[in-house]
Amino acid sequence: MTDHHHQTDAASSNKEESAAAYAAAYAAAQPDPGHRVVAVEIEACEFDWEFVPGVTTRAWGFNGSVPGPTLEATVGDVLEIRLTNRLPEPTVVHWHGLRIPAAMDGTEMVQRPVGPGETFIYRFRLPDAGTFWYHSHFNETVQMERGLYGALIVRAPDEPVFDADRTLVLDDVELDKNGQIKPPGWWIESHDGREGSTRLVNGRQEPEIRMAAGQVERWRIVNAASARYVLFSVGGRPFKIIGTDGGLISAPVAATRVLLPPADRAEIAVGPFAAGETLRIETLPFNRGSFKSHRKPELFATVQVGAAAPSRARLPDRLREIEPLVTGPVTPNREVRLGFGLGLKHGVEFNIDHEQHHHAEPVRVGELQVWDVVNRSPVHHPFHLHGFFFQVLELNGKAPEFLSWEDTVNVSAFGSVRIAWMPDDRPGGWMYHCHILEHHAAGMMAHFDVVR
Ligand SMILES: [Cu+2]
């Protein structure tokens, strides 16, 4: 009861509401029978890190590493994360892709930022298996660029069996001649977003990955980059796409490349390869409408295939059932316009429905949402919805190649994507935004409430 009387009634009632929502979500987070509470402590801090071998860079990250620790648990467990902020500025941590209560989503909509020296506890039950991640949702063009992110793997009891389960968190950083991360830039960077020229896998520049011949591995790929689109390739070899943002898809899909816009995830079955092979993990040329173009493949890592080892991998024909949310003709109930213009503050300004940091209409629990996300700009945007999975019904008017659960989807330049999602009973403040961090910062985001 310090400065309570100085606040407006609205502000204090909002504060009380969010405190009550947090307390309710905390208490409701109970593990399923036979499951446990996975308790972890993460410290957001500053430390020296070698992105490039032999070059010391001042980084920000969780528990002294980039990425932060990979958090692993099982569906039905409760994850309890005690976050302590040792940074010189506030932070919040967003649990990207997790269908958890609004109060635990980790945005400024639902919590006060965690100040330097403060501790905040996130606690929630894990409802879905899949490859998720966590990252700063505060001053992201600085905090995420410096390394405040990590992977979060949730497993189910009946997963397909592989010879190894490997997580590849992709990123890039732009280092100056002293090996330090450059501060956010102006003009081209505000338009394109930051694409660093040092490409990282799990916090290291172009590392070597060792794999046994004859084996098949499950790779969980997370694109943690600020703006770079990754058209992922493993030496041009065929692999199987087995999962996306929201876990496994219905059946494996054969591919030689998979597109990961920023924040996107893919799971692929890779191998078998022959002993002695060397394969380049690359991003292939991809035009997203940026000033900076990519005409050549760029290396992320190298796979060295060693001596053969026995394989126990078995990839089933069916991975799981995904019920379509929409079966017949449907009328969209919202159009989300991704737009841009020129402004004084950011150079290029990005907006949603002609408004920066748009306040969108609420949606009601249990009412199917069918949204047309329409891109009115000459650059691609990765559209991210917090807290709920959606299904893609149409990409530029055509059905997607396969049905999946997503939280991030690419909306191509002057293109459109039709999505469907069901607001389940998790009322509160949510958001959707472009996951190119510079576009998000420049206003391409919307707040909305899920109401009962
Ligand atoms: Cu964007």
Image (spheres, rainbow, N blue to C red):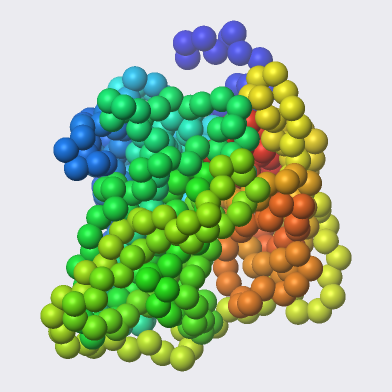
Q: Is residue 204 left or right of residue 388?
A: left
In the image, 371 versus 297, the foreground residue is 297
Percent x, y of residue 301: 31, 59
The quadrant where residue 59 appears: top left
Q: Is residue 206 left or right of residue 111?
A: left
Q: Is residue 255 left or right of residue 174?
A: right
- The vertical placement of 177 against 337, above or below, is above
- The vertical placement of 211 against 370, above or below, is below
Residue in the image at 81% along x and 79% along y: 328
Tally of numbered tags:
0
Q: Is residue 84 visible?
A: no
Query: Quick one: which residue is furthest to the front in this view?
Result: 295
In the image, 215 versus 281, the foreground residue is 281
Q: Is residue 307 visible?
A: yes
Residue in the image at 48% along x and 41% along y: 195
Ligand 1 quadrant assignment: top right
- The vertical placement of 157 against 337, above or below, is below
Residue in the image at 66% along x and 15% along y: 8
In the image, 382 versus 285, the foreground residue is 285
Q: Is residue 126 left or right of residue 5?
A: left
Residue in the image at 55% along x and 38% along y: 193
In the image, 295 versus 70, the foreground residue is 295
Percent x, y of residue 187: 61, 27
Percent x, y of residue 85: 32, 29
Percent x, y of residue 142: 44, 30
